[in-house]
Structures are given as structure tokens and as C-alpha cells.
């Protein structure tokens, strides 16, 4: 029998987080400005910590809640409803995935010096891999690192480093071993910021325009010039030539967390749509009573249902230590489209109000478009997913195992 029952203890944690998001974070959004952001966040964090809500997936011995994948997924699916949710529990991207990397691959010195203040919420961290020269295929990165005495010296450029301008630490990938096999040429370095060798050239204007508050939250993506950046030898993370292996590990969690927050955004969008159509009438009838409107809501419900099942199935595989790469790739693409579709429908049902900035819908509509690019574009994931379909067919004579069929 497949058991879809969520354990009692996990349900209780989800409920606690849901209450915190609905009763503390969402109400705080309204009055949160660039001027009072630090105070608002500090107060939310104080309240969260007082309830034992902090760094959900981080082990208890490091000050987190120690949640396993299923409980973490359920909690993240609540936190994403508010832009203050994940930040309040210190589990916001891009920091969270990098904390995970430091936890798994950091030396004792690195954990003590860099991870402890991150976990305590005193510092923030960004991840600089992508360059103008190389994104989807990061093996084209041009930034170099050369060992000179007891330090590495880095030169090159980075592009789209999210949250770099609020970060105290950057994790930077650079080529250390040009003659090694393609995926062993790069290493990862921990860089303390601000640093004269790591210069933010600009925060790149995107289709989701900067706001003063957004910049404080870390919603910026920076172009960075790396010039004679000196990094002490002990700041290489995870070993020489291991940049790719670690980067993939980090991105795998990041992709899932994006997906979990996408579910939360879509859920809040659908709730907003339901509230609107039940209170608005046109041509003598509530919008909610129109068949066409119900079909639109039904399509959103189906998308959200599939999204939840995918994430919970992946969480199940993670709990059991099973290989989840195929499901992760499928879900990454699906969830990016799902959130776009649901937000678009909710916006449409709001009419001009949806297009205005009086609800969060228009802002989400612009920002979620990035989901089809970030952490690898759709096409690259689908390319790999398709390759696994062929591989399964050639191995087993059926593609089932590449489509969830090994378990479902
Ligand atoms: C909002 C946002 C935040 C980001 N944050 C970070 C960050 O914090 N740190 C960081 O290092 N990077 C970050 N990135 C960069 C991101 O990871 C890259 O944009 C992504 O990997 C795609 O690389 P690219 O933009 O260079 O596209 P390219 O590699 O130039 O690809 C362009 C397009 O070509 C197509 N394509 C590429 N390869 C294939 C293929 N094999 N088959 C078929 N089609 C293909 C796809 O349609 C793709 O969109 C961020 C990007 C965005 C948009």
C-alpha cells in the first residue's frame, strides 16, 4: 500500500509555519519598505526563532530544525507564499543551497568562520558561476585561478550573481586545472566581501525592475569584474577540481526549492483569484458562477495538484536516498511553467486590477518568467530527460523507469 499520510509531527510543523506566514509575514508585507526592512525582518526573525522556526533543513546541532526532505518540502511550500517567509526563517535563496554546500563540503575552519554567521542570519552569501561567456554549459567559464605562494589569484568576470550586492561572502568558481578532464578543471573559492578584487560593475536591469525594497531583499543580479582577486589557499571549498561536482549538488537543491516556492506562489495566486471571483459580479452574476471561470480555476487546481505530487514523490525518493535526478529535471521544468500559468490565470481573472501593482500578481508574473532559465534552461533539462528516456528504453525495453514508473 502507498501511504500518503503525512506524519502527525510533520503536519504540526507545517501548520505552525502556515500560521506564521499567514498571520505574521503576509500582514507585514503591506508596511514593509526599504527604510524599515531591517527592523521588520529582525522582528519576524525574533518571533520565528522564539517558536523554534529557523533554517528548516539544517541539522539541529548547527542550530536548524533538522527537517528531513518531506517535512522541508511541506514547510517551503508554505514559506514561498510571502516574500518575507523564507527570509524570516533564514532559508532564502541563493543562501540556502550554499549553506548546504558548506555544511557538506566545508572544512572545520570554513564552517566555523563562514557557515556559523550564515546560519545565525548575520551574513548573506552569493554564488558566482555564470559568465557572459558560459551559462547553460558552464564548462565554458573563462575565469582563471592561479596559485601564487599561499594564495590563489583570480581573474575574469561573472554575470547574474544573485544577491551579490547584499552578500558578505561570495562563492566563486574558476578554472584551476586547464589540462584536466572537462568537469575537473574548476574549483570553488570562498571570497570575503567587500573585496577590491571582486567589483560589482552593476546590478543588471531585468524584466522584473529593481525597487529599493527588492534591492534590500537581495533581488538583484550583478555583473562582477574579478581582477587580481587574492584568495587564501585554505579558502578552496571541497577540494581542487571539485567545483562542478559541488555546483551540481548545490543546484539540485536550489532547483527543488524554487519549485517548492513556485507551488506556494501559485497557491496564493489561486486563493487571490478565488477571493476575487466570489466577490465580483458582471452581467448580473458572480464571476464564480460562470462555467468558463470555473474551468479556468479547475485547470489551475490540476496544475497545482500535479506539482504537489511531483514534489512529494521527489521528497520520498530523497528520504529513501534514491536517485532522483530524472524526476528533479522533469519537475524543475514543469513547476516553472505551472507557476507561470496559474499566476497568468489569476491575473486575467482580476481584470485591470491584476495588471496593476495593487496585488502581487503583476510582480509575480514578471519575476516567475526567470524560472524557465535559472538553474539551467528548460531545453537543457528536457534534453537530459529525453536522453534518460532513450537510455531506459535501451536498457529495459520500456521507458517506464524514466517516467516515474520504477516507483509509481
Ligand atoms: C534570475 C536569474 C538568476 C540567476 N542567478 C544566478 C546566480 O546566482 N549565480 C549564477 O552563477 N548564475 C545565475 N543565473 C544564471 C543562470 O544559471 C543561467 O542564465 C542559465 O544557466 C542559462 O545560461 P545562459 O543565460 O548563459 O544561457 P545560454 O547558455 O546562452 O543558453 C541560451 C539558450 O539556449 C538554449 N540552449 C542552451 N543549451 C541548449 C541545449 N543543449 N539544447 C537546446 N537548447 C539549448 C536555451 O533555450 C537557453 O535558454 C541566474 C539567471 C537568472 C535569469
Image (tube, helix red, strand yellow):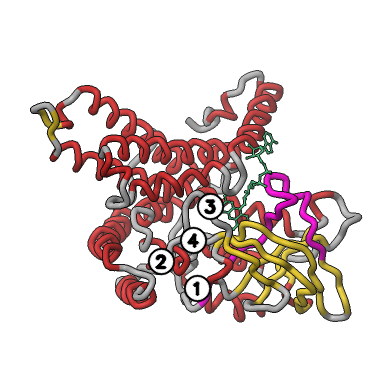
Q: Which residue is mark 4?
A: 219
Residue range (magenta): 123-144
Badge 1 density bin: few <14, some 14–19, many ≥20, Cα 10 Å: many
- Measure how far apart labels 1 and 4 are at the Cα level: 20 Å
Mark 4 and 2 residues: CB-CB less than 8 Å, in contact?
no
Mark nearer the N terminus (1 vs 2): 1
| Numbered badge on residue 119 | 1
Q: Quadrant of residue 102?
A: bottom right
Q: At which x and y percent is residue 143?
A: 78, 61
The relative height of residue 395 versus residue 205 in the rendered view (above or below) is above
| The residue carrying mark 3 has its beta carbon less than 8 Å from ligand 1 | yes
Asked if residue 362 can be seen in this view, the reply is yes
Q: How many marks?
A: 4
The residue sitting at 56% across, 69% down in the picture is 165
Q: Could you say which is closer to the camera, residue 75 or residue 215?
A: 215
**Residue 357, how many percent across, how many down?**
32, 51
Q: Residue at x 61, y 33 (%)?
A: 382
Q: Which residue is mark 2?
A: 213
* Residue density around tag 3, few if under 14, some if 14–19, many if 20 or more, within 10 Å: few
Would you say the residues marked 1 and 2 are in contact, meaning their CB atoms lie under 8 Å apart? Answer: no
Identify the residue at horizontal 28%, vertical 60% (top origin): 26
Q: Earlier in the sequence, mark 2 or mark 3?
A: 3
Q: Is residue 247 magenta?
A: no
Q: Which residue is mark 3?
A: 206
Q: Is residue 45 visible?
A: no
- In percent of width and height, residue 112 lies at 60, 80
Mark in front: 1 vs 4: 4
Vertical relation: 52 (above or below) 96: below
Q: Tag 2: Cα neighbours inside 10 Å, few (<14), some, or many (≥20)?
A: some
Q: Nearer the viewer, mark 1 or mark 3?
A: 3
Spatial CA distance of label 1 from label 3 is 30 Å
Amino acid at each position: 500500500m502507498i501511504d500518503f499520510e503525512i506524519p502527525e509531527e510533520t503536519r504540526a510543523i507545517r501548520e505552525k509555519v502556515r500560521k506564521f506566514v499567514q498571520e505574521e509575514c503576509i500582514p507585514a508585507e503591506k508596511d514593509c519598505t526599504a527604510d524599515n526592512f531591517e527592523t521588520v525582518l529582525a522582528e519576524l526573525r525574533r518571533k520565528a526563532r522564539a517558536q523554534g522556526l529557523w533554517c528548516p533543513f539544517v541539522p539541529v546541532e548547527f542550530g536548524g530544525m533538522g527537517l528531513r526532505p518531506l517535512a522541508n518540502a511541506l514547510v517551503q511550500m508554505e514559506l514561498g507564499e510571502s516574500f518575507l517567509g523564507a527570509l524570516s526563517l533564514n532559508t532564502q535563496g541563493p543562501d540556502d543551497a550554499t549553506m548546504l554546500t558548506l555544511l557538506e563540503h566545508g572544512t572545520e575552519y570554513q564552517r566555523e568562520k563562514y557557515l556559523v554567521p550564515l546560519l545565525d542570519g548575520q551574513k548573506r552569501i552569493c554564488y558566482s558561476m555564470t559568465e557572459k561567456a558560459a551559462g547553460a554549459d558552464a564548462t565554458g567559464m573563462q575565469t582563471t585561478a592561479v596559485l601564487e605562494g599561499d594564495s590563489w589569484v583570480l581573474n575574469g568576470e561573472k554575470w547574474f550573481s544573485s544577491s551579490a550586492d547584499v552578500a558578505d561572502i561570495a562563492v566563486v568558481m574558476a578554472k584551476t586545472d586547464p589540462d584536466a578532464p572537462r568537469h575537473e578543471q574548476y574549483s570553488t573559492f570562498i571570497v570575503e566581501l567587500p573585496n577590491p578584487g571582486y567589483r560589482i560593475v552593476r546590478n543588471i536591469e531585468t524584466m522584473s525592475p529593481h525597487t529599493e525594497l527588492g534591492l534590500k531583499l537581495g533581488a538583484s543580479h550583478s555583473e562582477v569584474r574579478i581582477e587580481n582577486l587574492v584568495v587564501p589557499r585554505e579558502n578552496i571549498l571541497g577540494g581542487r577540481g571539485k567545483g562542478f561536482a559541488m555546483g551540481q549538488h548545490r543546484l539540485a537543491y536550489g532547483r527543488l526549492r524554487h519549485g517548492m516556492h513556485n507551488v506556494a506562489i501559485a497557491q496564493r495566486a489561486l486563493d487571490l483569484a478565488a477571493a476575487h471571483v466570489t466577490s465580483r459580479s458582471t452581467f448580473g452574476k458572480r464571476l464564480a458562477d460562470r462555467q468558463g471561470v470555473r474551468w479556468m480555476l479547475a485547470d489551475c487546481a490540476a496544475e497545482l495538484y500535479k506539482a504537489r505530487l511531483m514534489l512529494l514523490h521527489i521528497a520520498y525518493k530523497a528520504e529513501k536516498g534514491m536517485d532522483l535526478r530524472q524526476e528533479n529535471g522533469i519537475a524543475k521544468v514543469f513547476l516553472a511553467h505551472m507557476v507561470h500559468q496559474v499566476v497568468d490565470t489569476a491575473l486575467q481573472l482580476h481584470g485591470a486590477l491584476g495588471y496593476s501593482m495593487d496585488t502581487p500578481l503583476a510582480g509575480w508574473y514578471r519575476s516567475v518568467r526567470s524560472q524557465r532559465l535559472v538553474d539551467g534552461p528548460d531545453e537543457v533539462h528536457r534534453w537530459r530527460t529525453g536522453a534518460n528516456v532513450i537510455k531506459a528504453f535501451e536498457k529495459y525495453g520500456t521507458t517506464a523507469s524514466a517516467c516515474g514508473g520504477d516507483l509509481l
